[in-house]
Image (tube, grey):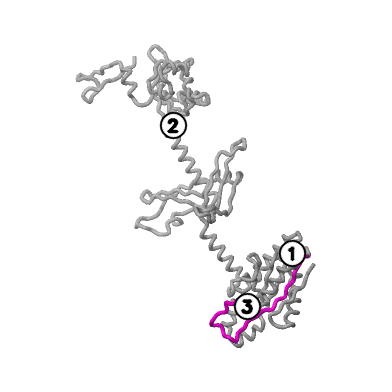
Amino acid sequence: MTVFHRITEGKLGAGDGCVIQDEVSQEFLDRIPGGLFRYRAEGEGIIDYVSFDVLEMMGCADYDQFRAVTDNTFMGMVHPDDRERVAREITEQISHGSTDVVDYRLNRPDGEELWVRDKGRYVVDADGTAWFYVALIDITELLQYARRLEQANQRVELLSVLSRDVIFDIQCQEQTGELFGDFEGRFGRPAKSSDFIVRKRCDKDCNVDLAVHDDRIYREMVDSGDFIDLEITMPDAQGDPVWCRYQSFVVFNEDGCPVRHVGRLLDTHEMMMREVMLRRQAELDGLTGLLNRDAAMTRIDAALAADESSVPCSLFLIDVDDFKQVNDGFGHPEGDRVLQEIAKFLQKTVRRDDLVVRLGGDEFAIFAEGLGPGPALDGVLGRLSGGIYAKGGRPADMPAELKPSITVGAVACTRHPVTFDELYQMADEALYVAKRAGKGRFALRNLD
């Protein structure tokens, strides 16, 4: 008989202090939250009492279904994959006392995963029969939350390892803090409170007790795993590229199958845009905005080295006629404007992918990949030597006496391989011939 000690007027028992023992109703026990059951400690662990909450946890409509699923034994309630561990843990705990606490999955007939916490007490009755009295609590949501919390902590640790960032969380009033990341590995010394409090917001001493998380296990995982770290672009809503740094790490199980993929996208767009702008500025001539000599040489050499087919190319060397007289007669500001006007003219005359370069001073060059001997090349030379204002566009404030013109020496190449020096030498020879013939002229050589 299950016995309940009744409380009367706030005290145990009646007014004379005696304890009144009543049999507890099934209705009362079934209304207590959580499951209750009892099973024999010896033998197969036969269950002789079970509350309705246990049936609900097991997913059984009635006791007959429960008995069919569990064979009316305690181990029949436990998921087959957990039985060996549960038996071992109960035996170990009971060897040191009369209570045990174990977590396991229930052996539900619908296969749903439901975790419970089993709190049992080992009791030997007066007749020598040993029992386990057990209270059962559903901890599925609790374990799911614990797993999410553990994964969140692992995520912080992994991301701090991937990026070599140091993350800190300080509780000001408690004077405690948590430190994620390899601070000592990055700075070569242990962390101090002053490293993270660069400006105080109160008068309290900032002597923080820092708890440093050991991330060595995650560093080892990263070192041995599949790690990717690169700059990429991703399209925004309008399809425009947005720069970000992609970092990811894949964790594999012992069979080589990926089980977790942790990563992040760092916003590096503004940084990359500044870097691109600075790189472009370093490649461009400050006065005309054309490619400078070093940047052009790098691109031309790369194009010539990569082109192993029979694709032709052409190199034009352009010299401003009588540029010294322009500077001497009209002043250097006007000379600078002439150079800018010629740069605009060259860019309008050639194709979009052709390289237009300011070599220095009043010398320019054009490298046209894919342009070889023929009408197209003749047309470009004709437009170049026809005068920079042949189609209008002369600035209204430019002195009428100032009539800038250019002379062009060109080489058309169909020979492979070829070097820039070879092209330059032939184009320079052609430029010398054109200048001897007069202003606003061109000369062409073929390299085949």
Q: Residues within 10 Å of mark 3 (few under 14, many from 20)?
A: few
Determine which residue is flagged by label 2. Answer: 140
Picture coordinates of residue 424, whole percent (x, y): 73, 72
Residue 46 in view, yes or no:
yes
Of the two numbered discs 1 and 2 in the rendering, the one whose residue sits closer to the viewer: 1
Q: Secondary structure at mark 3?
A: loop
Determine which residue is flagged by label 1. Answer: 312
Q: Please determine whether, in this image, residue 338 is positioned above or below residue 64.
A: below
The residue range painted magenta reads: 391-414
**Residue 411 on the magenta span:** yes
Instruction: Kindly report the distance in space between the C-alpha atoms of the residues bearing marks 3 and 2.
Output: 84 Å
Which quadrant holds the C terminus? Answer: bottom right
- Which image quarter: residue 345? bottom right
User: Which is nearer the eye, 399 or 1?
Assistant: 399
Mark nearer the N terminus (1 vs 2): 2
Determine which residue is flagged by label 3. Answer: 390
Q: Please determine whether, in this image, residue 210 is positioned above or below residue 404.
A: above
Instruction: Kindly report the distance in space between the C-alpha atoms of the residues bearing marks 3 and 1.
Output: 29 Å
| Left or right for 28, reference 280 | left
Q: Please determine whether, in this image, residue 259 is positioned above or below residue 426.
A: above
Identified at 42% across, 34% down, the residue is 142
Residue 184 in view, yes or no:
no
Please, which residue is most extreme toward the top here? 127
Instruction: Look at label 3 and name its amino acid.
Output: Ala
- Which image quarter: residue 386? bottom right
Picture coordinates of residue 287, whole percent (x, y): 58, 75
Instruction: Look at label 1 and name its amino acid.
Output: Pro
User: Which is nearer the eye, 312 or 357?
Assistant: 312
Picture coordinates of residue 406, whole percent (x, y): 67, 79
Q: Secondary structure at mark 2?
A: helix
Total number of numbered labels?
3
| Left or right for 70, reference 386 | left
